[in-house]
Structures are given as C-alpha cells and as structure tokens.
C-alpha cells in the first residue's frame, strides 16, 4: 500500500467545530488514516467558535488570496494540529464569512443566506492553501454539500498544473441536506453560466451544490453500506437518486466507527461508577445516579429509556409527537417506564416536549448540548431509543452497545448495518428493531423490549454483554477508504 497525501476539506472537525457526526467522523478517520502512514491534513473555516481554541492554533504569517470569479478575497490562516496527533489543521480566516456564531446557521436563522459564498470560499481556499504550502495532495476528500464544490473546482480550474493528477472523493453523510440556493448566487461561488450547466449544478432553476459534487467527484462514499443502497431509491435519495444511480459504479458504503478509548465504560471520566463486560454491577449505580441527576425516582426495577440527539423529524420526533395513539405520551402514560431525552432541534418539538414533561413525571427533557450528561445517559439507561425515519450511519447506537444499553432502532441505514434483531427463541441479536418508522411500530417495539426486560432478565444480560463485545472501529474504515482512494487514483 502506497502512502498517500490526503487533504480533508470540511465544514466540521472535532474538537474545533462540530454540529453532528460529521465533525467526529472527519477527525477520527484522519487519525486512523495517519496510523496507516498517510500524510493527512485538514482544512476548515475559522469560525467564531474556533477562536476559543487559540491555544492550539497559531496565525500563519502569510495571507492567502482566494480567487472567486472576477474577485479575489484575502484571507488569513490559523494553523495547528489535531489534538494528540501530528495531523496539521488549517483554519481559513475571513471575518465577513466566518466571524459569527454558528456553522450553517443560528437559532433564529437556521441557514445563513450567504452559505454558498462561505463554503465556496473554503473550497477554493483549499487549493490556494496547497500552493502556499507547496504540498499537493493525491486526494482531496470533501464532505457533504458544504465542500462538494471542491470536485467542481478540480474539474473547472485545476485540469492542468500541480493538481492535474489529484482526484476528488466526496463522502455523503446526509443526502437530506444539499445546499440548494438561488441561481443568483452563481457569481458568489465563482462560476459562470456555461459552467453552471456543464458541471451539473442546475436543479429546478436553482443551484444544488451537492448535485454538482456527486456528478463531478471521481469517487463517492456513503457512511454505511445500507445507506449507499437506500439513496439510490426515491424514498431516500432526496431527489438526487437519479444522479446517484448514474454514479453507482463509483459509490461505496463505508460504515463509520467510534473511538473506543473515549467511549469506554471502564474508565469514562463522566461516569460516577465504572463497569465492564465482566462486571456490570456499576451500571445499576450509574442508573441510580442518572435518575437522581434528572429528577426521576430512583427505581432500580423500572426500565429507563434514553435518547440523545437532534430533536427533528429525521430522528423520529414527528412520529413520537404525533397526535395519534401510541405516541410518546402513550409510551410514558401506558407503559411502566422512565424516559430521558437530551438534545436540541426544531423549536415546535422542543416546546411540545417541555409541555409533555410538565405533565408526565416519568419523562425528563433536557434541551441543551451536554457532553457529561450524554455519557451518563449512555451509561445509565437500560435502552436507547432511536426511531429514525432515515439514518445514514448513526453513532449513538454504537455508543449504546459499548455501554450495555440495548438499542431500540428502526430498520434503516446504518442502524440496520449495526444492530442485529433480538430473537426470543435463541436470544440472538444485539437490539430491538422497529420494522417501519410509524407510531404504532415504535410503540409495539418499545413494549416488547420492556416485556423482555421484566420477563427475561437473563436475555437482557446476554444482549448487554453481546453488544459490549461488538467493535466498529475507525481502523477498519480507514483501510476501506484507502482502497477507495487507490481506485480513484487509477481512473
């Protein structure tokens, strides 16, 4: 295996900037690629939130000129390394584009109106940064719609010169977000009308940044094998299934991994008690502590269900908060259970959950981003509910397995790739599968899981331990990404 130069161009990279799984995926994949000997570097914007990390970032002395169409924008560069690695990280500094709170939007403005310009500037700056460093990658690896323009720029402007042998790989983390903007933004992303059509950016008389990336990238990956198949269908393709079908011979599903050092119940600093696959006694103590922390009765025999994530339709909240019977209110009212929900999202769902928690003493809702509490829920809950309408990969079900918290998930995307259905005959499996994302299926699957909890405690312990023994590592994913890079370089 040859050692490659790989540039990650991304809107998120943990711990510098993170909204969801993308930020973790980029950083952990980069670490594992570096362990394989590749020269990996990361470039992302110097957001307002990144400025708090000045202790690990130093300003580069040279300014960076970035051409976009007929204009040139002058930017600064802050550089450092990914913590606990030697992986270089470069942050592009432009006050107008990035000197604000929020990555894609804010609570009042969910999608900044100048996002096309902001991320075009990042994507074009990536090439200029390489020129400044005199370091030219074999592969530019872009992620989702914000940096999918890298693949367009590679074809439109870099066909000759130092990037002529560079290949573009685009990872689709969530096809539900495509970067659709008015066609009047064309000048702000540095392209003309001829290029608009040639590089496949046209989408119902608008610009679709992800579409352009999909059709111009040399290779595509999705974040799980099942999701790679799903996005070829109208149900999951978000209107781009036709474009993806054209590229299906260059589309590979590679499952995300997790960091088993960070998520380790044997030494998790956020847990008041530790436990292991050979000694689960500490898990009951963590459950009691969690109940006390969120204001639930300390009942060891009442099953506790946790949820951590975005409170949005994709994660199933349109179903859980539906007015139909068997919704979340029914689960809490009709089943002997405790439920704790941690996250932020759609304001109308947040308000409904707050009202519901006021009425239901066995439902606790924490509407914030809270890392210590997320670890506590993973460690203390008996079950983890993830009723996603679609789920490209999902990470919380993997954390749950690691902590002996049995997942209850829909048969979708990465959830289907990682959770094996429980069979009461032989006690096989690692979790409970909701066969279809609808209110009744969620209720009945939760009810079944609670019945097993009460009537088959021996099965619950087997499921816990089997899940704790599973491994979904980034090292394996990095090897598969290396194979994709090598295939792209042969084109």
Image (cartoon, rainbow, N blue to C red):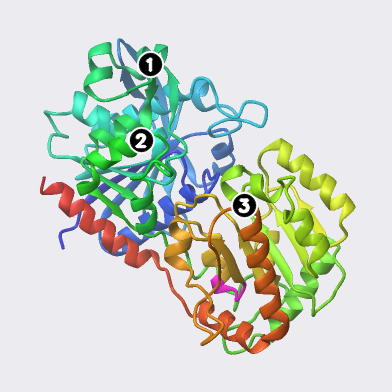
Residue underneath mark 2 = 240
Residue underneath mark 1 = 205
Residue 415 in percent (x, y) is at 48, 61
Quadrant hosting residue 200: top left
Q: What is the number of the mark on residue 340?
A: none
First-in-chain label (1 vs 3): 1
State if disc 2 and disc 1 touch (CB < 8 Å): no
Image height of 318 relative to 458, above or below:
above
Residue underneath mark 3 = 309
Q: Residues within 10 Å of mark 1 (few under 14, many from 20)?
A: few
Residue 132 seen from this side = no
User: Cα distance, mark 1 to mark 3?
Assistant: 34 Å
Of the 4 image quadrants, the one containing the N terminus is: bottom left
Main SS class of the magenta portion in the image: loop
Does 158 appear in magenta?
Answer: no
Residue 358 seen from this side = yes
């Amino acid at each position: 295996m040859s050692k490659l130069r790989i540039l990650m161009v991304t809107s998120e990279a943990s711990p510098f900037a993170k909204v969801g799984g993308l930020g973790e995926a980029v950083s952990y994949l980069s670490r594992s690629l570096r362990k394989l000997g590749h020269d990996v570097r990361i470039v992302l914007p110097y957001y307002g939130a990144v400025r708090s990390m000045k202790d690990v970032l130093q300003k580069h002395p040279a300014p960076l000129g970035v051409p976009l169409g007929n204009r040139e924008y002058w930017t600064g560069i802050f550089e450092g390394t990914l913590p606990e690695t030697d992986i270089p990280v470069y942050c592009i500094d432009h006050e107008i584009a990035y000197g604000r709170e929020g990555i894609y939007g804010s609570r009042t403005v969910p999608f900044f109106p100048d996002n096309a310009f902001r991320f075009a500037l990042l994507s074009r700056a990536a090439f200029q940064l390489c020129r400044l460093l005199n370091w030219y990658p074999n592969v530019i690896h872009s992620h989702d719609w914000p940096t999918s323009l890298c693949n367009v720029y590679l074809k439109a402007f870099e066909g000759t010169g130092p990037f002529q042998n560079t290949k573009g790989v685009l990872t689709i983390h969530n096809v539900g977000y495509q970067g659709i903007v008015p066609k009047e933004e064309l000048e702000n992303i540095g392209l003309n009308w001829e290029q608009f059509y040639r590089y496949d950016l046209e989408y119902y008389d608008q610009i679709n940044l992800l579409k352009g990336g999909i059709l111009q990238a040399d290779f595509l990956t999705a974040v799980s094998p099942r999701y790679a198949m799903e996005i070829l269908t109208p149900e999951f393709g978000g209107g781009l299934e036709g474009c993806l079908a054209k590229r299906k011979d260059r589309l590979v599903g590679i499952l995300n991994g997790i960091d088993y050092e960070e998520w380790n119940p044997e030494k998790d600093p956020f847990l008041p008690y530790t436990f292991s696959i050979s000694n689960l006694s500490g898990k009951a103590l963590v459950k009691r502590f969690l109940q006390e922390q969120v204001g639930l009765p300390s009942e060891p025999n009442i099953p506790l269900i946790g949820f951590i994530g975005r409170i949005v339709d994709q994660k199933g909240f349109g179903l859980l908060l539906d007015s139909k019977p068997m919704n979340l209110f029914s689960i809490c009212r009709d089943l002997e259970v405790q439920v704790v929900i941690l996250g932020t999202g759609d304001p109308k769902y947040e308000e409904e959950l707050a009202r519901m928690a006021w009425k239901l003493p066995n439902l606790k809702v924490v509407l914030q981003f809270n890392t210590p509490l997320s670890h506590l829920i993973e460690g203390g809950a008996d079950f983890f509910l993830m009723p996603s309408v679609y789920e490209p990969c999902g990470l919380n079900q993997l954390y749950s397995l690691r902590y002996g918290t049995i997942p209850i998930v829909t048969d979708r995307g990465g959830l289907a790739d990682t959770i094996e259905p429980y069979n009461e005959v032989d006690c096989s499996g690692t979790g409970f599968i909701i066969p279809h994302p609808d209110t009744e299926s969620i209720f009945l699957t939760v009810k079944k899981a609670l019945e097993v909890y009460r009537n088959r405690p021996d099965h619950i312990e087997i499921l816990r331990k089997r899940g704790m023994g599973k491994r979904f590592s980034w090292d394996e994913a990095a090897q598969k990404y290396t194979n994709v890079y090598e295939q792209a370089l042969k084109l």
